[in-house]
Image: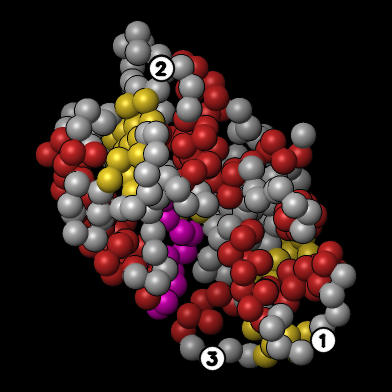
Amino acid sequence: MGAAQQNTASPEPGGGCTPNVFGGMVTRTVGPRPWGRWRDVRAANTKEDEGVSASEVLVTGGTGSLGHRVVDRLRGPGYEVRTLSRSARGAGVVRGDLQTGEGLARALEGVDVLIHCASSPRKPRQTDVGGTGHLLEAAGRAGVSHVVFVSIVGVDRNPYPPYYRAKLESEKIVERSPVPWTILRATQFHGFALKQIRLLERLPVMMAPRGFLLQPMDIGEVADRMVELALSEPSGRVPDIGGPEVRALPDLARSYLKASGRRRRIVEVPVPGKAARALREGAQLAPGQTYGEIRWEEFLDGTLRSGFHGTGRKKLA
């Protein structure tokens, strides 16, 4: 079946609720939760089934923060999971360079499902745009039956940062590909927000951008959804997913300082520019499409203790 026939889905409101902001905090009503669905889908898709068979899966960026969680969830009976890497070695790792295209044809031999997690905020033109082009071209020649691509909520509403613009261009490359596809947009990971706050913390006074709205999400929960989609039929643009609460960046910073026992004065400063305005207006939010359950304070509690780096629902067990 051609890509044009398969990729007809459009984003619709998810099964969660709209996060409501009150003074930087949030109240919410938890809707139906999808936890465990990816395990059910994986168990159902055995080699003997007449439906989708995801027995051979290639994950790009499989050694990265999101990719390695996707790989971990796919490991099990009936699945051969490969990780594409330019330099890493080890069992299940295949060599390939997204920026040049070298090694991609060999890495994709026999692959049914391609999960594209590789990304580079530092080199978005080379890795995200050029790399996605090389990858999808090779996937088309290899006869891959399904590519799943992870993107960022609001890249079309806030295309001003170079990285967001590159992610939007990458989406279009996937959409034009002859390979049947699924694109999932997620809100920013908890770890991204933490990194920004720790950069601000370097100064004696934290100069936090005023009014920047985020809906941070646990990275393990995004991996859960990626696997569920990868082991299902190609669905085009699926509904966006977001974390359980909308928070202003200065509020997230205050919670971080409290959890870490640090003392800093926070001064909220206005930031000019189109990208900043889009963030204040909620361009990076997914209202009505709450998927994640792990809140910012829960993430901090785990992260500031050793051994937790975002694992999805298992973190709460």
The residue at the point 73 percent across, 77 percent down is: 250
Classify the position of the C terminus by image quarter. Answer: top right
Which range is magenta? Answer: 147-161
102 horizontally vs 305: left or right: left
The residue at the point 35 percent across, 13 percent down is: 47
The residue at the point 43 percent across, 35 percent down is: 229
Q: Which of marks 1 and 3 precedes in the sequence?
A: 1
Extreme-front residue of the structure:
89
Q: Which of marks 3 and 2 precedes in the sequence?
A: 2
Per the picture, the main secondary structure of the magenta-coloured stretch is: loop
Q: Secondary structure at mark 2?
A: loop
Please state the horizontal and vertical placement of residue 261, each as a whole percent of the image: 87, 70
Question: Which residue in the protein does label 1 denote?
Answer: 265
Extreme-left residue of the structure:
141
Question: Which residue in the protein does label 2 denote?
Answer: 78
Amino acid identity at mark 1: Arg
Depth order, front residue of 138/81: 81
Alpha carbons under labels 2 and 1: distance apart: 54 Å
Alpha carbons under labels 3 and 1: distance apart: 22 Å
Amino acid identity at mark 2: Gly
Question: Which residue in the protein does label 3 denote?
Answer: 272
Amino acid identity at mark 3: Pro
Alpha carbons under labels 2 and 3: distance apart: 53 Å
Examine the rendering and report whether any part of residue 10 can be seen. Answer: no
**Label 1: few (<14), some or many (≥20) within 10 Å?**
few
